[in-house]
Amino acid sequence: MWPRIPGIFSCLKGSAEVHFQDFNAEVLRCLTIPNVNANLLDKSQPATASKARFFTGDWGEIHQLLPHANESEINAEHGQDTGYDVILMAETIYSISAQRNLYGLIKKCIIRPHGVVYMAGKKHYFGVGGGTRQFLSMLQKEGVMAATIVTEVADGSSNLREVWKLLYKLILILSVLQCFNVMNILVSFVAS
């Protein structure tokens, strides 16, 4: 149940808002909310609990409840940057049939063009067919987002776990162009 830990950490480090989401309302009610409350309602902390909000629902429809997803859809037409700056997700890609809805939700929620998604998951989910490679293949086919590996965790006795960073390709291209620009400036400086 570690996906709550990064959200709790984000609250404690001063994030303006942190939204927790799960398909199952019981998971939010019985695990997530008590865990968040236990960590954020410490009397030595300022009123950080007000920063946390909780949402339940299917990825195909939850964007209707998420405030930044709605803003992202509406304001994209007007050229305004809205949406989530960072999305942290873990163990979300195990079901092949749900991956398309998850990817659609990411695109509706992430701020363009500089938002980032950190996705933690297993390379393969045996018995259900999903995994990081299956999900990344879908991203690659569409060509809108780029993925880079952040880390691999292999303990030798279980499935390989990976953390991936996803962002819009425009940002990746701009980063590469900035590197070339800096290199050209350095080369020009050294040559003169």
Image (spheres, rainbow, N blue to C red):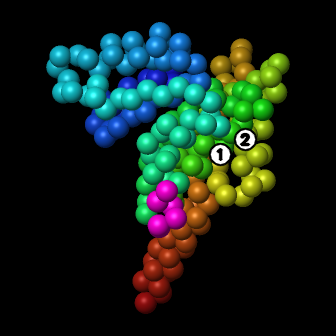
Is 138 situated above or below 159? below
Q: Are marks 1 and 2 in contact (CB under 8 Å)?
A: yes
Residue occupied by mark 1: 104
- Categorize mark 1 by other alpha carbons within 10 Å: few (<14), some (14-19), many (20+): few
The one nearer the camera, 135 or 59, is: 59
Q: Position of residue 162 (x, y in %)?
A: 64, 33
Question: Is residue 42 magenta-colored?
Answer: no
Give neighbour class at mark 2: few <14, some 14-19, many 20+ (Cα, 10 Å): some
Image height check: is 37 above or below 92? above
Q: Picture coordinates of residue 181 (x, y %)?
A: 50, 76
Left or right: 139, with 191 as reference point: right
The residue sitting at the bottom extreme is 192
Q: Amino acid at mark 2?
A: Arg
Does residue 146 lie above or below 10 as drawn? below
At horizontal 43% and vertical 63% (from top left) the residue drawn is 80
Residue 170, by quadrant, is: bottom right
Please report the bounds of the magenta region as a residue range.
74-79
In the image, what residue occupies the spot 46% across and 13% down? 29
Mark 2 residue element: helix
Q: Residue at x 78, y 32 (%)?
A: 97
Q: Residue at x 72, y 41 (%)?
A: 100
- Residue 4 in percent (x, y) is at 46, 23
Q: Quadrant of residue 159?
A: top right
Count of marks overlaid on the render: 2
Nearest to the observer: residue 9 or residue 23: 23
Can residue 45 be seen here?
Answer: yes
Closest to the observer, 99 or 73: 73
Q: Quadrant of residue 131?
A: top right
Mark 1 is on which residue type?
Gly
Instruction: Identify residue for label 2.
Output: 100
Q: Nearer the viewer, residue 23 or 117?
A: 23
